[in-house]
Image: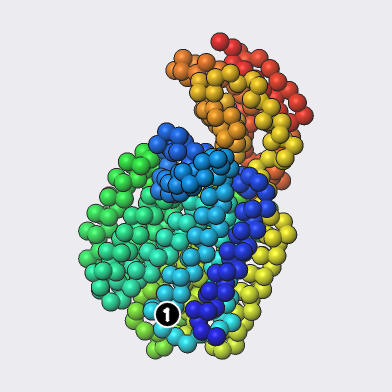
């Protein structure tokens, strides 16, 4: 069996798994499932985003939906938005296997055990993190596809000094910036690490220029995210492990796996100098700080969780780079361990798929709130994170999270301001025993106007 055949088979399996996970319920699974489709609908209706964000994926979805609506004018636009979003998430992410195959073929240049490639390819698309990013993390997933293409062309440029590879890699880096902020930041870490390892002191000017341009570009797209590139250190770190890690087995496994890879890289660099080529040695040095940064154990929980879900990319590439230094026994053992991890994870995820943010019963109850809303365009509803997107999707209203303060300007802009407090019916998907999402705290000058088993609704007095 040819190497590319292995990748193709795993690609088909990944499409099938993601398809099952995406289409197992009518709406979008996951705590943030409503966010993407709200943004897409806003682009279709107004030509702009509902909230500042990296815009590329929303506009791509909206463009496809508009074409389909023109071809099928009788179709329900909202249903079309959901279907197109699910299809894109299902079909596009598995393409990430192609740049991985290209890295293995063009940059590692070694004869691989087929079982080892099965394990690596499966880990790349069917382990916990790639599957967890399905459905409600579409921007993150597809940005990682672009990032893997970017890594391939960047590493190829470092090897061959071909200007074409540098240009194509830079274009992918730009596309990543327009797709997902977090993946863009990780891509910059890879860029800076590579420049330092391969060019040393000569890279300082390039790092300063590219870093400044990156901050300015993000500032244009989303000033808040651009500012966070300069101030992230104020909120990212902690000196204590989060108690929620006890309820997050993947986080524990991910730390251990990354620490093992860090040890293997250091061991390979220090004990097998005579066996490792200069280019492969430099690539291991490049990915060493990347893995350390992504798996640093003293981040705040959410910060570390998000970085951890992206670490499978450098982890997998590192396993390819380490392969020539492994004994046959080690290669076989790693192959079977990876295949076992992929099989177990896929089975668990398929038998316990990610649910919708709220239960079917509470969603039906939330739909009844429409009778309270007289002017959606001038209505603001406060709701907890994860619920607010579905309120906006269902009722076409403006939304705010509980931490937003009601000021005089908001009172003048909106005719009706509501506070939606959920009592029951939240599907807990975040690690831990209880929800981390805070419910709105209705102010004293508000009246209870609706109460059910699932919700209480308060209206701010005029």
Q: Is residue 51 left or right of residue 423?
A: left
Q: Residue furthest right?
A: 453
Local crowd size for mark 1, using a 10 Å CA cut-off: few (<14), some (14–19), many (≥20): some
Q: Which residue is mark 1?
A: 105
At x 52%, y 64%, the residue is 94
Task: Give the camera-side residue of 5 and 286.
Answer: 5
- Give residue 303's position: percent from left, percent from top: 51, 49
At x 51%, y 41%, the residue is 73
- Which quadrant, please, contains the N terminus? bottom right
At x 70%, y 24%, the residue is 456
Q: Which secondary structure, mark 1?
A: helix
- Give residue 86's position: percent from left, percent from top: 56, 52
Task: Give the camera-side residue of 46 and 284.
Answer: 46
User: Which quadrant of the figure has residue 394?
Assistant: top right
**Can residue 163 be spotted in the picture?**
yes
- Give residue 110's position: percent from left, percent from top: 44, 85
Q: How many marks?
A: 1
Q: Is residue 405 above or below residue 89?
A: above
């Amino acid at each position: 069996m040819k190497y590319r055949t292995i990748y193709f088979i795993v690609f088909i399996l990944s499409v099938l798994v993601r398809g099952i996970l995406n289409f197992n319920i009518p709406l979008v699974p996951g705590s943030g499932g409503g966010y993407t489709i709200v943004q897409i609908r806003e682009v279709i209706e107004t030509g702009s985003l509902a909230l500042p964000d990296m815009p590329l994926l929303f506009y791509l979805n909206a463009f496809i939906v508009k074409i389909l609506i023109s071809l099928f004018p009788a179709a329900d636009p909202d249903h079309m938005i959901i279907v197109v979003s699910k299809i894109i998430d299902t079909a596009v992410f598995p393409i990430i296997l192609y740049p991985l195959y290209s890295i293995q073929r063009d940059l590692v240049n070694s004869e691989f055990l087929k079982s080892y490639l099965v394990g690596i390819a499966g880990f790349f698309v069917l382990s916990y993190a790639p599957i967890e990013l399905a459905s409600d993390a579409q921007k993150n997933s597809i940005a990682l596809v672009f990032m893997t293409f970017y890594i391939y062309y960047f590493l190829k440029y470092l090897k061959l000094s071909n200007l074409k590879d540098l240009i194509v890699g830079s274009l992918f880096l730009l596309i990543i910036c327009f797709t997902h902020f977090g993946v863009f930041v990780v891509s910059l870490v890879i860029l800076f690490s590579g420049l330092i390892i391969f060019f040393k002191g000569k890279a300082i000017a390039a790092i300063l220029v590219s870093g400044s341009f990156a901050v300015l570009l993000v500032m244009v797209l989303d000033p808040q995210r651009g500012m966070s590139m300069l101030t992230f250190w104020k909120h990212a770190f902690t000196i204590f492990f989060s108690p929620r890690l006890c309820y997050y087995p993947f986080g524990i496994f991910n730390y251990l796996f990354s620490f093992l890879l860090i040890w293997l890289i250091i061991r390979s660099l220090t004990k097998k100098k005579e066996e490792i080529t200069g280019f492969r040695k430099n690539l291991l040095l490049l990915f060493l700080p990347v893995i350390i940064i992504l798996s640093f154990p003293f981040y705040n929980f959410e910060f570390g969780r998000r970085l951890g879900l992206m670490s499978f990319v450098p982890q997998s590439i590192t396993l390819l780079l380490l392969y020539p230094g492994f004994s046959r026994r080690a290669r076989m053992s790693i192959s079977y361990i990876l295949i076992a991890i992929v099989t177990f994870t896929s089975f668990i995820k398929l038998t316990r798929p990610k649910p919708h943010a709220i239960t079917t019963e509470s969603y039906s109850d939330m739909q009844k709130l429409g009778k309270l809303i007289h002017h959606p365009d001038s209505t603001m509803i406060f709701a907890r994170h994860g619920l607010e997107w579905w309120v906006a999707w269902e009722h076409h209203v403006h939304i705010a999270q509980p931490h937003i303060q009601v000021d005089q300007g908001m009172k003048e802009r909106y005719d009706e301001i509501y506070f939606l407090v959920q009592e029951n019916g939240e599907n807990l998907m975040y690690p831990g025993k209880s929800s981390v999402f805070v419910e709105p705290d209705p102010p004293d000058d508000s009246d209870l106007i609706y109460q059910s088993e699932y919700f209480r609704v308060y209206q701010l007095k005029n």
